[in-house]
Structures are given as structure tokens and as C-alpha cells.
């Protein structure tokens, strides 16, 4: 990881442990080399860094392109190699860049639900994560955050006291030849399976 990412990793790690008693259940499952799609439930703006600090290596993630409009925030996100995406008009360049990262052996964080939950309850998965699984053939690590909704829900203006736990599931390597579906149907089937594995995780 570069210096900017390392510094952010250190600062947010101390922040999360000090303010939220942050802990990781199953951290040993994250210690492996090679590519992976890290698939997590999405309930708060805090989710990307809360997942990323569980790793000892750089985790690549996405952010709305509009966030890059802020000069300071945009510079930070670019230094962390965050991929800017337009949720309303996903483009081929973003897809190709993400596939390239996975094929280069990097780990990429994705939120199958596509957007933050309004009530903290897991939502249905969108097909996008299934497309990345099918195109990259990368293994998937399902993880689930508990407590980040209570700490900073969607409409909140300030942080709230909460204990936050990240639970790590078993690595899943789907065998695409075992699926009868093709195209978007396959992508949705894979996405639904990822979401099921996330939802089944408990503290």
C-alpha cells in the first residue's frame, strides 16, 4: 500500500477501535494472497473503510463520481486508487478497470445491494456483482458488518455510539459450468447467492 493509503488505514483503524470497539470475527480467513471480490452488506458511509482496515493490504473500492468533484476529497480518493463510478450510467471503462485489477491479483470491495440500506436490513442484490464474478472468475469473500447502521445510518448528521463488528465468511469459488443460466440471468443468480451468504453470517 502507498503512503497515503497506509496513513488513512492507520488513522481510521485507531478511530474505529477507539470509538466503536471495532473487531473482526474470522480475520484469519482474510490472510491469503491473490485476487478476491470482497462482498459486503451496505448500511453506512463508514462501510468501505471499516472493511478495508481488516486487511493488511490495499483494498480497491468504488465511490460515486460526484465525490471526486471536491478537490480535497477527490485527491484523497485518487491517492487511495478508488474507482469513480456513475451509478446511473455504468460504463465499460469501469468494468474493464475492475476486471484488470482482479486479474492482476488485487482485492476489490463490492456492495451487492448497490446502495445503502434505509433501515439496516439487507436488501436484494443487484446483478452487477454477479457480472464481475463471471467475467473475472475471482473467488468471493462474503463479509457482514454489524453496528455501522447504528453508528451512522443513512440520514444521520452525526456519529452515534455503537459497537461495530465485521464477520468474515468462507471463501466461495463458484463453478460457472454448474449453472444453467447465462447472461444477465447468470449474473443475478450469482449475485443472489453472494447476498445469501452475506445475510447468513452472524456475530
Image (cartoon, rainbow, N blue to C red):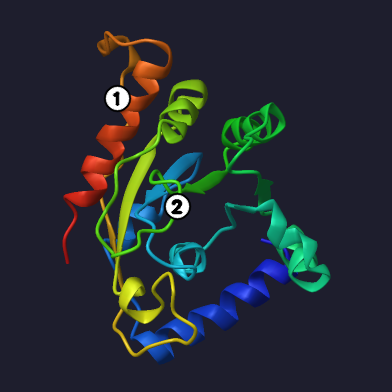
On-image quarter of the N terminus: bottom right
Of the numbered discs in the image, which one, if any, rests on residue 136?
none
Q: In this view, does 183 lie to the left or right of 198?
A: right
Counting labels gives 2
Q: Which of marks 2 and 1 is in front?
A: 2
Is residue 122 visible in the rendered structure shown here? Answer: yes
* Quadrant of res 195: top left
Q: Mark 2 points at which residue?
A: 115
Q: Is residue 188 left or right of residue 64?
A: left
Give residue 18's position: percent from left, percent from top. 42, 91
Task: Name which residue lies at 35% across and 62% down.
Answer: 118
Mark 2 and mark 1: span between their CA atoms? 19 Å
Badge 2: residue crowd in 10 Å (few <14, some 14–19, many ≥20): some
Badge 1: residue crowd in 10 Å (few <14, some 14–19, many ≥20): some
Looking at the rendered structure, the secondary structure element under dot 1 is helix
* Quadrant of res 25: bottom left
Task: Name which residue lies at 37% across and 63% down.
Answer: 43
On-image quarter of the C terminus: bottom left
* Quadrant of res 78: bottom right
Q: In this view, does 152 lie to the left or right of 192?
A: right
Q: Mark 1 points at which residue?
A: 189
Amino acid at each position: 500500500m502507498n503512503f497515503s493509503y497506509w496513513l488513512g488505514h492507520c488513522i481510521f483503524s485507531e478511530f474505529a477501535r477507539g470509538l466503536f470497539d471495532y473487531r473482526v470475527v474470522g480475520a484469519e480467513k482474510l490472510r491469503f494472497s491473490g485476487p478476491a471480490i470482497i462482498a459486503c452488506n451496505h448500511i453506512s458511509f463508514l462501510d468501505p473503510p471499516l472493511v478495508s482496515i481488516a486487511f493488511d493490504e490495499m483494498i480497491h473500492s468504488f465511490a460515486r463520481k460526484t465525490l471526486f468533484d471536491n478537490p480535497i476529497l477527490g485527491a484523497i480518493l485518487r491517492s487511495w486508487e478508488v474507482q469513480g463510478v456513475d451509478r446511473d450510467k455504468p460504463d465499460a471503462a469501469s468494468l474493464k478497470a475492475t476486471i484488470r485489477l482482479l486479474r492482476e491479483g488485487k482485492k476489490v470491495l463490492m456492495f451487492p445491494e448497490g446502495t445503502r440500506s434505509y433501515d439496516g436490513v439487507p436488501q436484494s442484490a443487484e446483478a452487477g456483482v454477479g457480472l464481475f464474478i463471471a467475467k473475472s472468475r475471482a473467488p468471493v469473500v462474503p463479509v457482514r458488518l454489524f453496528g455501522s447502521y447504528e453508528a451512522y445510518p443513512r440520514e444521520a448528521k452525526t456519529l452515534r455510539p455503537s459497537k461495530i463488528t465485521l464477520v468474515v465468511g468462507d471463501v466461495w469459488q463458484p463453478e460457472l459450468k454448474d449453472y444453467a443460466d447465462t447472461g444477465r440471468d447468470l449474473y443475478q443468480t450469482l449475485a443472489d447467492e453472494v447476498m445469501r451468504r452475506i445475510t447468513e453470517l452472524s456475530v
